[in-house]
Image: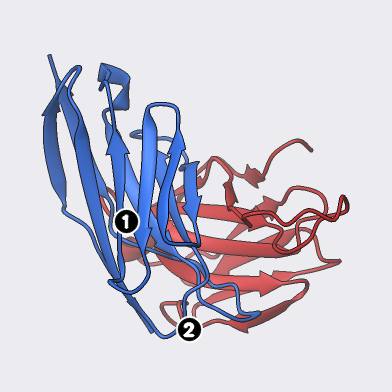
Amino acid sequence: GQNIDQPTEMTATEGAIVQINCTYQTSGFNGLFWYQQHAGEAPTFLSYNVLDGLEEKGRFSSFLSRSKGYSYLLLKELQMKDSASYLCAVRPSGGYQKVTFGTGTKLQVIP
Amino acid sequence: GAGVSQSPSNKVTEKGKDVELRCDPISGHTALYWYRQSLGQGLEFLIYFQGNSAPDKSGLPSDRFSAERTGGSVSTLTIQRTQQEDSAVYLCASSIFGRGLAGLANTGELFFGEGSRLTVL
């Protein structure tokens, strides 16, 4: 099975940097996704990590440590529009493609 | 179509009625997923299709829930004898994993539809 943990809520200031952590326990691992979901909207893809290390994409970066079962999403130069839920999701190894999502972290950006 | 299409976008029904939700995935996507999201909650996995077969139905909450996929494309999620606790947004997503037509590996990211909001009175 898979168990994914994220903080429920976070608050950060506009212009600052925030790190959202995700820990997971899986019977097999073949990639971790981060998605952004604004209230009332569908989740949209942010990043994918399958190897250890940092993946940078503009203001967003995602880090993975497979040995520790740990990932984080780093958001720089926060903007008000970054207020959303951030979902961590894990895909198992093998041909079996079930993708399991964590409960999400609701980020509020304040002026 | 260009994206994942779901219908209806909103459905209000009376307790005890059956409902059918439809998902039209991105053309060529072999994997199709159904998730349920209650207000303020995360995504609850319901079922996953690879082609027309469903390797994992473990997330279906009860035997009132069923899903099928035909022609490796459109999928329907059926909820029989709806209950108030079935009220939620039902999200469909599709993905392709492995080597695409160009021979390049891809992430197999899930592309989500806008969801079907079900309200059971």
The image quarter containing residue B82 is: bottom left
For image coordinates 60% across by 44% down, the residue present is B8
Viewer-nearest residue: A105 or B85? A105
For image coordinates 58% across by 53% down, the residue present is B110
Chain red in the figure, letter: B
How has the structure been colored for display? by chain
Q: Secondary structure at mark 1?
A: loop
**Colour of the chain lettered A:** blue
> Percent x, y for residue B59?
45, 77
For marks 1 and 2, the one nearer the N-term is: 1
Viewer-nearest residue: A29 or B29? A29
Q: Is there any visible trace of residue B120 in the rendered image?
A: no
| Amino acid bearing label 1 | Gly
Label 2 Cα neighbours within 10 Å, binned few <14 / some 14-19 / many ≥20? few
Viewer-nearest residue: B64 or A97? A97
Q: Are the numbered discs 1 and 2 placed on the same chain, yes or no?
A: yes
For image coordinates 55% across by 78% down, the residue present is A93
Q: Residue lying farthest front?
A: A53
> Percent x, y for residue A11?
11, 33
The image quarter containing residue A36 is: top left
Side of A68 where B98 appears, left or right: right
Up/down of B29 relative to B1, above or below: below
How many labels were placed on the picture? 2
Image quarter in which the N terminus of chain B is found:
top right
Residue B42 — which label?
Answer: 1
Up/down of A7 relative to A58, above or below: below
Residue B100 — which label?
Answer: none
Please state the chain letter of the residue tagged with numbered disc 2 in the rendered image. B
Question: Label 2 belongs to which residue?
Answer: B58
